[in-house]
Image (cartoon, coloured by chain):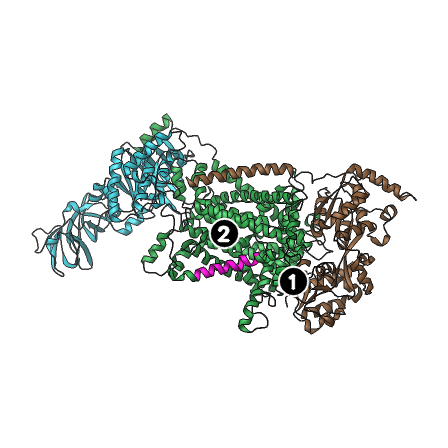
């Protein structure tokens, strides 16, 4: 064997074959996506910070800048501030506990057992996402108002009670409704992980003689940790900043939360301009909270390899047989569906068939009329509204999902240091904590001055939707990406495939279920979104949510409900189609 | 196989979206962004002959061709537009439905970038100062040129008062019968209504009522009301629903006009003929840098004119209540009910009361 | 030919677990073409890191890597050829079969995108599948196969582009014992058949001995020893080699007479002449010999050099051999012999170890000090 030095000497004189390294497409796309993400996030973030310290009373944030911490003083100095924060925390913790545990149970039943009728169930269970929050909250009051609530009316005679037993205008009621409301989204985020878990890990546990409960607790749940944590963190922020349910139920319950404070600041009784300053100060507090959560999340999911479940070994988990649990599971699932899907939908349907609200009764049935349907269908602007809505939701969905998928890859596998990737992760999550009105204002302000014609077009609406939903998208896609073993990618590279080929032929197909679910979620929410759209829509870009809103504000409840009914039916079909597609793709039944 | 098939579909779908987007961009118009225009000067009020001046404005307006109107509810516009087109043919009315709060935000933000995208506004009385202090509203000799009564002009010729929404005590006729119906505001404090009262979340009505009751008494009254464990509901529509379906028996929040409408359709709701009743005034006018200034003047005038208001009522819209123009206004007059409209000279006190009431309603027990 | 020179890998800061951790501390070796070359060592020794550096899946901190006459990595000359351009085949520990594709699609993947006509691709894929015995499963969906079958798919995929070098990262560790042996045979015969260079990573010394032409033993990011299996087994020059490969006894002994090359030591069992592989003139050394390299006596034999005396303890019947301990004072050694020998618990016994089979090394502490 020749000595190494001799060998290298020979090569040096003859020159090694210097390979040309072209500009890596991977690096280019990654940097582009990161820049784009920063661009999308920085607008609302800047507006948030700027108005929290610079906004003067009686003026919009950009009208004058006078640095002061008065907004913070006002927000924090509110004597009830502590109570408000406590309310928020209880509300958040409680609703998360309910929502996520229900979601985990449902995900388990739907993905890992032989429960019948899964496609139907999946299609239905997602429908509440399509119901505008206000209507959703109101339908629950129809069910559980202590005087007239239908559930109460059913149960009262059994116990000989005068009122109740359920009263929805309490903190408990708020927590319950919000918790239930979270279930479809939580289900989406978690179910994908369940569907692709490595069953050998559980089989081992079974071989060791552990029962189903123990296996779930000690094997399955820990593996779900990243996607569970992602869901938890996402919902923690959502629950802190969501306001429709606390507003509808919390006012009577005299339980203000942080989000209602933000709402009141930005929707004062007439005479005052919205106080973006205080709203932003509160928003910053929320943002700090969100950032703390995300650093906890990053610390807990440090070792990505621990959580890979798609490794190219046995891909589909075995279905457990429910056996004697079947009837209980069946009742549980369908009861859930009846309460969360059929009840609100029927409430909506009922309202759409009466010009003014009539309580549910026989006489009520007789006064049914289709007038509202006629009125809506005869609207001259209906085609435009429909078209704009479809365009906006589909485009927002696709673009956000595309960005989220790339962000998912960058955060988990990107050619950057861990610090950088964690930063990208955190940045993509920030908009979740910025109040929607601040997002709307920042976009309005930026694009009205923009050299390109974006203001007043559908593009600004799409940008608004992407800004708002990027956080959800990135949570979902990062979790999905974590599940895919990096060796699947590496095997592709070693086989000679370029990075883009690897993305297209290996990663995208494996991520397809998550991508589809993500798209559907975003499309549904974009269709429903009001707070941002209402600040950015214009005569030529009327969409469904603004139309419903204007009808509702004008007291045209029947017609608003008709549009609601259309929306739900449409989205129900979309869910079904999506579910059928996803299940065919992953070969599950 | 199946995977690559779906994959291709997704790719095609995406491509389609991009194309649609491009199409959407093109068509949904850069027309909304209208650059700053030199304000067309309206002729000074000539001494004597009014209709001449109007004729001149009309000629200019015809050349402009259209007027952009931001309104809170465009369902009532049909009759108004009919009437307007008869009186001033050749001017197209483009309406855009938007609530006052968003409208104010937008007008200010757009103006900050030098843009004005609306000709005629439809806002609440108390929204005007925000625009006036930024010098965004045009003042015009409405009385001299168009003959509008000075009673209906406010803010130094900058706003025209059109119609009112009213905030009486409203009740469910199945739950409140005969002499249970309140005869005075104090009746609301009767312990038998505990847990059965409804209040709209922003405490509408009470700040204006303080004109007559004074600040202290108003706040005391609200405090007492809160002890009745009211149902607090955000928004006019849900307030009305809550009364109709019996969640609350009696309350403040729904408008008399909506109550009347529903009563006609058989709903168990009615309003108490108890004074004083607070009114919220809708105002209209035109912006200083309106893209179609002359058409704007004409349309704003029409909205505030007798004909325009009759058209509005005929189309199912609200009335100018303090003039007893329509059925509700007449009923109120018959019962000798004192009607309170907002006045900007008294705004400081009203604002204070409003803030305190808001605080009370949004606080914890 | 593969050449690695002074490969160093330090994990960058920001990786809280590992910042500053030196996974490789200067690895250099050359692999002749057609060799079955194994990197052997315990977990964390750096063998997988080295393999992945050759593959291009990891970027070292310093050093150079040549594949043939191509420089694929050099820190000083700032060269890094990405993995997709290195033209290697690789079998991963977890097989990394793509679950959404069939067996055929998995194996044909490396050949796509090369402008090869479909017929040619099909021919090559069939050939690779035949070689691993999976031709019948061509159109099965990959996840439906058993572990062993999936592993063969991985192998076929790695071979289909007929690379000159095949990298294997502990490919057999997930298989059961019988399957492992079978695959071992097949791997070796495929390698001989195709004449490719195999770079194999394992922690299983038995496997390494069975398969390799050359073994490089690694520990803590450094090479301990490199050589042919027989050499490393019969004449390990480092203490670690003796302990890691096969089983060895180590008895602390005192040097009685020193001369370079061979030495005389004394311990509780007796006095022994041994090969001297210590690197300094320390008094206390470790005497090492393998359990089966002994001759056993019930009565004291005539010579007294290289004879150990002690009591029998803990007899274990292993089927082909019998294993037991011999105790003298505080010290224990493990011995193995044919079961016919029938030792008895507590009995006194004598054993002879040929000086050829005795080696002395520095004691463990010394080894470690010198190690870093």
Q: Nearer the viewer, mark 1 or mark 2?
A: 2
Query: What's the CA distance linking mark 1 and mark 2?
Result: 45 Å
What chain is the green one? A
Is A339 covered by the magenta stretch? Answer: yes
Task: Out of C268 and A209, give the one closest to the viewer.
Answer: A209
Q: Is residue C228 left or right of residue A313?
A: left
Whether residue A52 is visible to the viewer of this picture, yes or no, is no
List the residue tagged with mark 1.
A78
The image shows residue C340 at horizontal and vertical percentages of 10, 53
Q: Compared to A354, does A539 lie above or below? A: above
The image shows residue C352 at horizontal and vertical percentages of 12, 51
Q: Specify the quadrant of the image occupied by residue B347.
A: bottom right
Whether residue C18 is visible to the viewer of this picture, yes or no, is yes
Residue at 37% in and 59% down: A215
Mark carried by residue A123: 2
Point out the stretch of residues depicted in magenta. A328-345
Label 2's element?
A: helix
Check the rendered structure and report the hue given to chain B: brown
- Mark 1 is surrounded, within 10 Å at the Cα level, by few (under 14), some (14 to 19) or many (20 or more) other residues, namely few
Label 1's element?
A: loop
Mark carried by residue C321: none
Check the rendered structure and report the hue given to chain C: cyan
The image shows residue C177 at horizontal and vertical percentages of 25, 48
Whether label 1 touches label 2, CB < 8 Å: no
Task: Out of A379 and B359, give the one closest to the viewer.
Answer: A379
- Mark 2 is surrounded, within 10 Å at the Cα level, by few (under 14), some (14 to 19) or many (20 or more) other residues, namely some
């Amino acid at each position: 064997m020749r000595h190494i030095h001799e060998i290298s000497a020979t090569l040096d004189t003859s020159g090694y074959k210097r390979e040309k390294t072209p500009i890596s497409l991977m690096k280019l796309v990654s940097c582009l996506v990161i820049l784009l993400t920063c661009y999308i996030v920085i607008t609302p973030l800047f507006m948030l910070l700027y108005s929290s310290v610079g906004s003067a009373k009686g003026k919009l944030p950009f009208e004058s800048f006078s640095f002061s911490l008065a907004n913070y003083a006002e927000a924090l100095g509110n004597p009830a501030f502590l109570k408000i924060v406590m309310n928020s925390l209880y509300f958040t913790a409680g609703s998360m506990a309910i929502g996520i545990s229900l979601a985990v149970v449902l995900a388990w039943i739907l993905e890992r057992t032989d429960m019948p009728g899964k496609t139907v169930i999946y299609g239905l269970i997602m429908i509440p996402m399509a119901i505008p929050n206000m209507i959703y909250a109101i339908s629950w009051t129809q069910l559980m108002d202590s005087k007239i609530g239908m559930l109460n009316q059913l149960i009262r005679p059994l116990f000989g009670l005068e009122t109740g037993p359920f009263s929805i205008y309490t903190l408990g009621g708020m927590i319950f409704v919000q918790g239930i409301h979270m279930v479809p989204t939580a289900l989406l985020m978690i179910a994908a992980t369940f569907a692709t878990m490595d069953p050998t890990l559980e089989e081992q546990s079974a071989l060791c003689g552990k029962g189903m409960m123990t296996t779930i607790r000690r094997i399955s749940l820990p593996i779900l940790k990243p996607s569970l944590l992602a869901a938890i963190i996402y919902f923690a922020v959502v629950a802190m900043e969501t306001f429709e349910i606390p507003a509808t139920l919390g006012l009577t319950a005299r339980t203000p939360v942080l989000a209602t404070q933000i709402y009141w600041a930005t929707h004062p009784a007439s005479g005052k301009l919205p106080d973006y300053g205080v709203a932003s100060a509160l928003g910053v507090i929320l943002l700090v909270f969100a950032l703390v959560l995300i650093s906890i999340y990053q610390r807990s999911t440090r070792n990505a390899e621990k959580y890979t479940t798609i490794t190219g070994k046995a891909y589909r988990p075995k279905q457990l047989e429910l056996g004697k649990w079947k009837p209980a599971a069946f009742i549980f699932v369908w009861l859930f569906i009846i309460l969360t899907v059929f009840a609100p939908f029927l409430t909506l349907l009922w309202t759409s068939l009466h010009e003014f609200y009539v309580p549910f009764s026989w006489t009520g049935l007789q006064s049914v009329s289709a007038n509202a349907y006629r009125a809506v269908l005869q609207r001259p602007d209906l085609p435009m509204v429909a078209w704009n809505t479809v365009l906006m939701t589909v485009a927002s969905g696709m673009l956000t999902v595309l960005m989220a998928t790339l962000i998912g890859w960058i955060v988990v596998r990107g050619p950057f240091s861990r610090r950088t990737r964690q930063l990208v992760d955190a940045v993509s999550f920030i908009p979740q904590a910025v109040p929607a009105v601040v997002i709307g204002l920042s976009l309005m302000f930026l694009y009205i001055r923009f050299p390109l014609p974006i203001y007043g077009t559908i593009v600004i609406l799409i940008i608004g939707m992407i800004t708002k939903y990027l956080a959800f998208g990135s949570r979902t896609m990062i979790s999905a990406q974590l599940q895919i073993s990096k060796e699947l990618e590496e095997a592709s590279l070693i086989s000679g495939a370029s990075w883009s080929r690897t993305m297209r032929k290996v990663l995208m197909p494996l991520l397809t279920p998550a991508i589809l679910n993500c798209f559907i979620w975003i499309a549904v929410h974009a269709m429903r979104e009001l707070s941002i759209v209402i600040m950015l829509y214009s005569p030529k870009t009327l969409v469904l949510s603004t139309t419903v809103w204007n009808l509702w504000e004008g007291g045209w409840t029947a017609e608003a409900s008709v549009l609601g009914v259309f929306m739900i039916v449409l989205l129900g079909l979309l869910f079904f189609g999506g579910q059928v597609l996803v299940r065919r793709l992953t070969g599950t039944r | 196989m199946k995977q690559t098939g779906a994959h291709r579909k997704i790719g095609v779908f995406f491509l389609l979206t991009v194309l649609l987007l491009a199409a959407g961009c093109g068509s949904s118009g850069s027309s909304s962004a209208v650059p700053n225009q030199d304000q067309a000067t309206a002729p000074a009020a000539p001494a004597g002959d009014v209709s001449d001046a109007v004729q001149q404005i009309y000629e200019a307006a015809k050349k402009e061709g259209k007027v952009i109107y931001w309104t809170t509810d465009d369902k009532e516009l049909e009759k108004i537009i009919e009437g307007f087109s008869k009186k001033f043919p050749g001017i197209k009315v483009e309406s855009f439905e938007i609530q006052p709060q968003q409208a104010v935000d937008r007008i200010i933000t757009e103006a900050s970038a030098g843009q004005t995208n609306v000709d005629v506004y439809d806002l609440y009385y108390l929204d005007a100062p925000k625009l006036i202090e930024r010098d965004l509203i045009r003042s015009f000799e409405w009385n001299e040129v168009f003959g509008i009564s000075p009673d209906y002009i406010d803010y130094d010729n900058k706003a025209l008062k059109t119609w009112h929404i009213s905030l009486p005590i409203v009740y469910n006729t199945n739950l409140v019968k005969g002499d249970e119906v309140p005869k005075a505001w104090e009746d609301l404090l009767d312990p038998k209504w505990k847990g059965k009262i409804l209040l709209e979340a922003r405490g509408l009505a009470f700040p204006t009522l303080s004109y007559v009751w004074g600040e202290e008494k108003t706040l005391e009254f609200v405090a007492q009301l809160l002890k009745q464990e009211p149902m607090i509901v955000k928004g006019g529509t849900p307030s009305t629903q809550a009364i109709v379906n019996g969640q609350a028996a009696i309350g403040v929040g729904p408008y008399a006009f909506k109550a009347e409408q529903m009563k006609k359709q058989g709903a168990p709701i009615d309003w108490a003929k108890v004074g004083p009743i607070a009114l919220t005034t809708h105002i209209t006018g035109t912006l200083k840098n309106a893209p179609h200034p002359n058409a704007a003047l004409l349309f704003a005038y029409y909205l505030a004119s007798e004909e325009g208001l009759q058209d509005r009522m005929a189309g199912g819209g609200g009335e100018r209540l303090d003039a007893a123009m329509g059925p509700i206004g007449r009923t109120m007059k018959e019962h000798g009910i004192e009607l309170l409209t907002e006045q900007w000279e008294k705004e400081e006190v009203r604002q204070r009361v409003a803030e305190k009431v808001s605080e009370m309603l949004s606080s914890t027990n | 030919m593969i050449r690695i020179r002074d490969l160093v890998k330090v994990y960058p800061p920001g990786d809280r677990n590992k910042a500053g951790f030196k996974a490789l501390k200067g690895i250099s070796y050359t692999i002749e073409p057609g060799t079955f070359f194994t990197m052997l060592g315990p977990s964390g020794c750096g063998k997988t890191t080295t393999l992945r550096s050759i593959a291009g899946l990891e970027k070292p901190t310093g050093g150079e890597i040549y594949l043939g006459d191509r420089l694929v990595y050099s820190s000083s000359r700032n060269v890094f050829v990405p993995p997709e351009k290195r033209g290697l085949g690789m079998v991963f520990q977890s097989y990394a079969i793509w679950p959404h594709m069939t067996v055929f699609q998995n194996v044909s993947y490396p050949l796509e995108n090369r402008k090869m006509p479909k017929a040619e691709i099909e021919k090559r894929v069939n050939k690779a599948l035949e070689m691993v015995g999976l031709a019948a499963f061509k159109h099965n969906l990959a996840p439906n196969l058993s572990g062993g079958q999936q592993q063969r798919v991985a192998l076929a995929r790695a071979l289909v582009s007929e690379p000159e070098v095949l990298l294997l990262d502990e490919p057999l560790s997930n298989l059961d014992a019988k399957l492992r042996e079978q695959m071992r045979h097949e791997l070796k015969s495929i390698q001989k058949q195709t004449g490719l260079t195999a770079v194999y990573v394992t922690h299983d010394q038995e496997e390494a001995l069975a398969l390799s032409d050359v073994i490089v033993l690694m520990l803590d990011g450094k090479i301990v020893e490199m050589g042919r299996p027989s050499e490393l087994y019969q004449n390990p020059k480092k203490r670690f080699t003796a302990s890691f490969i096969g089983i060895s006894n180590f008895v602390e002994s005192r040097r009685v007479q020193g001369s370079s090359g061979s030495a005389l030591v004394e311990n509780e069992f007796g006095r022994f002449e041994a090969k001297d592989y210590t690197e300094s003139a320390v008094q206390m050394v470790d005497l090492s010999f393998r359990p089966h390299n002994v001759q056993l006596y019930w009565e004291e034999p005539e010579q007294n050099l290289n004879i150990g005396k002690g009591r029998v303890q803990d007899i274990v019947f292993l089927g082909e051999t019998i294993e037991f301990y011999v105790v003298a004072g505080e010290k224990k050694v493990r011995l193995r012999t044919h079961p016919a020998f029938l030792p008895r618990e507590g009995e006194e016994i004598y054993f002879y170890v040929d000086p050829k089979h005795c080696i002395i090394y520095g004691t463990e502490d010394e080894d470690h000090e010198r190690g870093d």
